[in-house]
Amino acid sequence: MASNVDPSISTLRDDPARQRPRWPATLSVIIHWLAAAALFGALAGGLFVHRLSSCCDVGHWTVYNLHASFGLALLALVALRILVRLLRPWPALPGHTPPWQRLIARATHTALYVLMIALPLVGWSIVSAPGCCHINPYVFDWFTLPSLDPAPIPDRTVAFAIHSALAWIAMGVIALHASAALFHHFFYKDDILARIVPSLRSSLYSRDKG
Ligand code: HEM
Ligand code: HEM
């Protein structure tokens, strides 16, 4: 059966990029998946809370609090992730990666960082804006954060519109990011997905040796 592996794709032995660290730090991988889970949790909570009919009943507040908690946990995870990345840089992309893909990967990762920081901050601004409920965000019932004073976006309606638009943009960027990772894994059969799914690495080593 014909293989769709590009012959120009190098293996462990002949790719100079592989002389550098090949895998990200384990802590970076763990943070990647915790941040992804927090972002998915916040997105699901945000979409669900908006569809709950009666504002301010117990169900609404429970979902809202979970939503805000996931969002604020994400903010803390991003801070930690940036610190870990500074201490242990992410490995370079494999040598065969075309320049346009490098550009898109860089742009997508930058956009994800901006979204992971902006979404929770704009959400926090909604509940801190004058005229709003002035709810101090609860973080998983562990502790309460103060309102932002002054609110970075003073008009609550504007803040909500920005928050909502950013959430939809995030869904699009995540879909692009995840599709690219899966495409690399199944079409190029390179080690991009294995960077953040360590269980895939052993099969790459046996392929490299073969
Ligand atoms: C909310 C969801 C996600 C976010 C916010 C996110 C964010 C990121 C970011 C910012 C990076 C760049 C490296 C870093 O700084 O850690 C990255 C790397 C990566 N992500 Fe995600 N990710 C998400 C979900 C996923 C999913 C679902 C997949 C797989 C299907 C995936 C696959 C990858 C891969 C393979 C890399 C390594 C790319 C490389 O080495 O250049 N991510 N992710
Ligand atoms: C990654 C983090 C977050 C994501 C992805 C996110 C996403 C969303 C989404 C999708 C909605 C519904 C928008 C719509 O229906 O048009 C929403 C609503 C909302 N979000 Fe967030 N959000 C995040 C963080 C936060 C945080 C940290 C807070 C507050 C501290 C917050 C406060 C709100 C409020 C007040 C609403 C309106 C809820 C309602 O309709 O009753 N969000 N968010």
Image: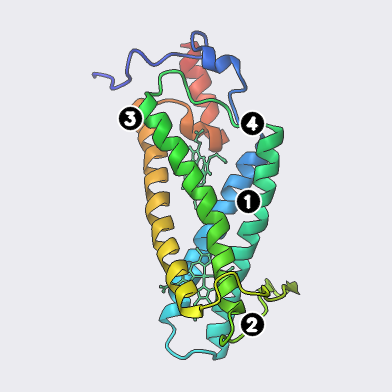
In this rendering, which labeled residue sits more in front, label 3 or label 2? 2
> Would you identify the image quadrant in which residue 62 lies?
bottom right
In the image, taking residue 132 as reference, residue 210 lies left or right, namely left
| Mark before the other along the chain sequence, 3 or 4 | 4
Instruction: Give the numbered dot on residue 78.
Output: 1
**Disc 4 residue: CB within 8 Å of ligand 1:** no
Asked whether residue 37 is in view, the answer is no
Structural distance between the alpha carbons of marks 2 and 1: 24 Å
- The residue identified by callout 4 is 89
- The residue identified by callout 3 is 187
- The residue identified by callout 2 is 135
Structural distance between the alpha carbons of marks 4 and 2: 38 Å
| Mark before the other along the chain sequence, 2 or 1 | 1
Question: Which is more toward the observer, 204 or 162?
Answer: 162
In the image, taking residue 57 as reference, residue 190 lies left or right, namely left
Structural distance between the alpha carbons of marks 3 and 2: 48 Å
How far across and down, in percent of the image, does residue 158 sit? 45, 74
In the rendered structure, which amino acid carries the disc numbered 2?
A: Ile
Please tell me how many numbered marks the rendered image carries: 4
Instruction: Give the numbered dot on residue 164.
Output: none
In the rendered structure, which amino acid carries the disc numbered 3?
A: Phe
Question: Which is more toward the observer, 32 or 208?
Answer: 32
How far across and down, in percent of the image, does residue 59 sit? 54, 85
Structural distance between the alpha carbons of marks 3 and 4: 27 Å
In the rendered structure, which amino acid carries the disc numbered 4?
A: Pro
Local SS, label 2: loop
In the rendered structure, which amino acid carries the disc numbered 1?
A: Val
